[in-house]
Amino acid sequence: MEALLHETSAQPIYFGAKLMSSAQFRSLFQEGMDLVADAAAYLDGEGRDDSKRLNRAGALAYSVESMRLTTRLLQLASWLLLQRAVNEGELSAEDAGSDKHKIQLSPQDVATNEETFGLLPLRLCELIDHSIRLQGRILHLDDLLQRAEADVPQPVAQRNPVAECLDALKAALAREIGEAEGS
């Protein structure tokens, strides 16, 4: 009889949870992590040599844009890692929601004018362009997730006539038992 008391109802499938556990998210995650590794390898290796060959304006632009690239990639990697932690059950969605506010996902374009940007090494420009495209995709995905979370209906207590009948029977039986013991 106890099994009859448990309510079962169809649960909605939430877009965010479905999308974040998809192959597309895993691919996006891998692309983001690969881009972080590629940028780090370039900036710590060949990029150092490239920056030394630039004139003063180019060196300043290199410094600004490499710092912006690093900041952009750290934000994207943080967002991706947070989403993956939720997917893998390492973090609850509620905890992620509070931690998420610490990640500043905002559109960040190139700060250098077009002429000076043209002086930068080709590999740095490729990394910057790739990071901006990835950032656009992640911002779009984050927006979709936020809108989906806002649309999640709040659970409404539903009337369960069977449970109500069982509760009434239990109460009646309890009264009967109580009266029988009292006699």
Image (tube, rainbow, N blue to C red):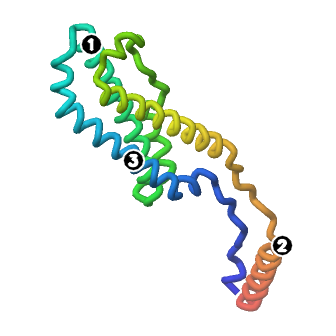
Query: What is the three-letter code of the residue carrying label 2?
Result: Pro
Q: Quadrant of the C terminus?
A: bottom right
Q: Which residue is mark 3?
A: 81
Which residue sits at x=21%, y=15%? 54
For residue 161, the mark is: 2
User: x%, y% of residue 165?
Assistant: 82, 77
Mark 1 neighbour class, 10 Å CA radius: few under 14, some 14 to 19, many 20 or more: many
Q: Quadrant of the N terminus?
A: bottom right
Q: Which residue is mark 1?
A: 58
The answer to whether residue 69 is above or below residue 86 is: above
- Give the farthest residue toward the top: 56
Which residue sits at x=34%, y=35%? 74
Tell me if label 2 and label 1 are in contact, CB under 8 Å. Answer: no
Indicate which label's residue lies in the foreground, 2 or 3.
3
Q: Nearest the camera: 77 or 86?
A: 77
The tag earlier along the polypeptide, 2 or 3, is 3
Q: Callout 3: helix, strand or loop?
A: helix
Indicate which label's residue lies in the foreground, 2 or 1.
1
User: x%, y% of residue 60?
Assistant: 26, 12
Whole-Å distance between the Cαs marked 2 and 3? 45 Å
Q: Nearest the camera: 37 or 154?
A: 37
